[in-house]
Structures are given as C-alpha cells and as structure tokens.
Amino acid sequence: MELFLQQVVNGLMIGSTYAVVALGFSLVFSVMRVVNMAHPEFFMVGAFGAYLTITYVTRNILGVLVGGMAAALVVGLAVERLAIRPVRGRYVMIPFIATSGVSIALQHTAERIFGSDPVLVPPVMASVSYNVGSLSVTRMQLVTFGIAAALMLALRYYVRSTKWGRATRAVAERPDVAAAFGVDVNLVSRLTIGISALMAGAAGVTIGLLYTSAWAFMGLLFGLKSFVCMLVAGNRHIEGVMVIGLLLGVLEALVSGYVTSTLRDAVAFGVLVVVLVFKPKGLFGSYDV
Amino acid sequence: MSTLLKVTGLEVMYGSVPAVGGVALEVPAGQIRAILGANGAGKSSTIKAILGLVKARGSVEFQGRAIQGLPTHRIHRLGIAWVPEGRQLFSTLTVHENLEMGAFARGHGARFGAKLDEVFTLFPRLRERRAQVAGSLSGGEQQMLAIARALMAEPTLLLMDEPSLGLAPKVVQRLFEQIQEINASGLSILMVEQNARQALKIAHYAYLLEVGRLVGEGPSSELQASEHVRRVYLGG
C-alpha cells in the first residue's frame, strides 16, 4: 500500500507534465488540423533555455521559467511562420512531414550547439523532501506539479471563459463560419501555436530541473508519449487530455514499481493500441481531419 | 433608393468546373431579394463568393466599396452577416456562446444585452435554451439560432442560405414571417431559396439562376405571374 501510494504520487508529478505537452499538441491540431511534429522540440528548447538562463542570467526559479518559455515561444513562432503557414490547409500529411523535418533539424542544431550528451542543468533550489507519513515528495516535484497545474487551469480558463478562447473553439469547429463572424483565423492560429509553445517550454524547464539534465533528443520519447495521450483522450475536450496525461504518469509509475522499470516506456504505446482498437477517435472524441 | 450590394460579372470555378458564370445582381437598402434555383444552380457559391469564402472573379461592391479579395473577417466587419446553409452552428458551444460569437466583431459592450433581449423577443425558445449546447437543439430551433447569431452582429446586410431547408411546413411559415419582421426593422436581406413559393411571397424582387447563369429576374409579383416561373419553380 505504501509503495502504491508513493508511486501514484510520483506518477501524478510526471503525468502533469505529459498533460501540459499533450495539450499543446491537441490544441494546435484542433484549431489548425496540423499534427505539429516539431512540438516536442519546443519542450527541448525550453529545457536548454533553462540551462542557458541558469548559466548566464539567474538562478531564480521564476526567471528560469520565463527564460525557457521565451526561448520556446520564439522557436514556436518561427516554426509557424516557416513550416506551417506555407503548407496549411493542404492534405494533413504535408504539414506533418514539413514539421517532422523541422523537428529533426532542431534536434541536430541543438546537438551541434550543446553536444550529443546531456548537459547538466544545475539545481536552482535546495533538494528538500517533505514527508507525510511514509510518503515522500521532493520540493522540485511539487514545483513541477504546481507549474503544470497552474498552466492547465490557466489554459482551461482561457479556452472556456474568454472571448478569444471562445473564438478558438469556434475556429476548431468551423473556421469558415468563424471567419464570417469577424474572427481572424490566422491570428487565432498564431495565438494557439504561441500558447502551445509556451506550455511545452515550461514543461521542458521543469523536466530539465527535475532530472537536472537537458539533451538534444529529450523531446523524442517525451513528445511521443504526450502525442499518445492526445490520441488516447481524443482532441475534442481539453479536460480529457489532462486526465489521460495524469493517468499515463500514474500507470507508468505503477509499472516501474510493481513490474519492472524497463517496461515503463512501453506502457503508453500498449495503452494506445488497445484504446484505438475499440475507440478510434479516442476516449472522449476527436475533431475530424 | 441606395444600392447596398452590387455584384457584376461574378464567376466561381471549382477546379475546371464553372459553378457560377457571370452573375450580376443588386440589393437596394431595405429590400428582401431572393435568388431562386434548383440544387446545384450556383446559389450557395454566389453567397460564398460575396463573403470571400471561395475564390471568384468579377466585382463585388458593398456600400460603394469594392470588397472582392478582402479576407472574410474584414468583409464581415463592414456589416455583412451570414446565415449559412444547414445552419452550421458552433454545435459544441452553448446557445449563449453562439450568440456571443455572433457579436464577436462588435464586442461585449452595453449594446450586447439590448441586442440579446431583442433576439430573445423574436425567438423566445432560445431564451429558454440559452445554457444548452447548440448541437442538442431541434432543427427549427437551430435555424432560429443561426438567424439570431447573425442578428447579434447588427449587420446592414443579411445573407441567408436556404433558411427553410429541412424544416416542417408549419415552421417554415412562421420562419418566413419572422424574416419579414427582421426586414421591417430595417435590415436588407439577400436570400437563397429552393422554396420559391414562400420566397416570392416575402421578397420584393428575385433572380432566377439555372446552372450558374441568370435566366431571369424581376419583381416578385411579375415572377409569380410568369408562365415559365410557375412551371419550373412553383411546380405548375
């Protein structure tokens, strides 16, 4: 029972970050019908942004967060301009391939700059653990979860309760009609990519700090798992993506705790296969391509 | 009488297939004008071309200003609202949110509440259902919402595409009365309809479209009396 609870807690901490990255994937797909394969690199750029901020600017956690998010935003808007806008509205595979190319280019650019081995991200806070009964949580885990939770609540508020969030949902469903009511669809698309990049960047910062490392290829597996979260949940409801992200984290932690940690990375893909067989549009439904 | 909308030489191609070939029409301020024709006659394409939703050649002037080539969201902001064919509501948004989207370009100012009251007076059912998701409304209620959403924009010109499609005859009757009320309140309307009988009852003037070309036009009373119109559009 103690192991179970501990692994659930550990799983929620990491799962919250899966959810944050998956939400960006999902939001961009819903609004633009583009599978942005460069999205995981926004996460990687966020981690290196944190590394650079700590090395050259500040160790203040908020400063580091802003640094990582800003780096991801700049790269995100550039990717939108150079690789997504020119091929939007075409058959869904074309932006998929264009952004896959960008993804590979970004990975190898990072490898050129930072080397092919992970770099050490120096810790920005004392490694303190909090114990509740037999449960133990580190301060960095709590910060990771807190940042992810804040981002998810902010996104939910934006999408559900603001004028531009409402317009974003309208564009996701019927871009032509939204335009005919005065919504600048291109502006909404740029906003959406920007938000997705900011969120992935923040996730990269927290994961970089949590594992004290940043690596040119760190987006690959993490991004793939987040992508799986979106497919399993379906992209119609952001709450669905949040829940599945958290559940994946918990499930992985339980498999590492009770079975073997070498199977951990297989969990997401096993779940994906099973869900897609029975629910091809995901558990909570998806927009059509 | 000032001309609100003036379309000349409008051509729409889908690939190499012409959908609209050289249509010319006008909507004077204060009138209801109808475009009549069978399925595939190019009626919807004409509306979409005016809104900038499909590529078109020719000239479209609104209040004396050339608008062809402008992006759709800017055309809307000049005062043109659309009731699309098949409603095309934001079905995952609530009734209230759909109405807020209607007023997107206007913003949420003091007039929003007054306008909301106005459309709820016209369509009381919508007030009862305001918190409901639009996709859960009946066909008639959805059509009301599609019209109400467009009215929220406080347009100068309303483009209505097949407002009667898929509705029960009794509902259609009431709907056309409401369209007349809307027009009486000062809004000009260009309407596309397959239901020529009903449309001619409320329109001041109508255009006859056959396979993308105008084959006739005139005041509704004249068209109702025409032998050709009776045979082809009114079913004898």
Image (cartoon, rainbow, N blue to C red):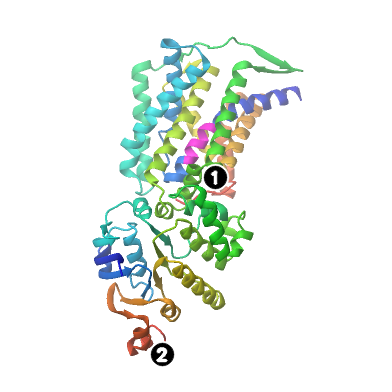
Where is residue B73 shown, x and y percent of the image?
37, 51
Residue B81, image quadrant:
bottom left
Towards the viewer: A32 or A5: A32
- Viewer-proximal residue among A92 and B4: B4
Residue B127 on image: x %, y %? 61, 59
**Parent chain of label 1:** A
> In the picture, residue B224 is in which quadrant?
bottom left
Quarter of the image for residue B128 reads bottom right
Question: Overall secondary structure of the magenta stretch?
Answer: helix
Q: Is residue B166 above or below residue B88?
A: below
Circle 1: is it few (<14), some (14-19), or many (20+) Cα within 10 Å? many
Residue situated in front as seen by the camera: A41 or B196: B196
Identify the residue position indicated by label 2 in the image: B236
Q: What is the span of residues highlighted in magenta in the rendered image? A: A19-27
Q: Position of residue A85 (x, y in %)?
A: 33, 41
Going 34% across and 34% down the picture, which residue do you hit? A101
> What x and y, as percent, mark residue B210?
31, 76
Residue beneath label 1, please? A234
Disc sitting over residue B234 in the figure: none
Residue A37 is a magenta residue = no
Which residue is at a point 56% across and 25% down the rendered structure image? A147
Q: Secondary structure at mark 2?
A: loop
Disc 1 marks a residue whose amino acid type is Gly
Q: Is residue A22 magenta?
A: yes
What residue sits 27% from the left and 64% below the top?
B12
Query: What is the chain letter for disc 2?
Result: B
Compared to A153, does A111 lie above or below? above
Residue type indicated by callout 2 = Gly
C-alpha separation, residue under disc 1 versus residue under disc 2: 52 Å
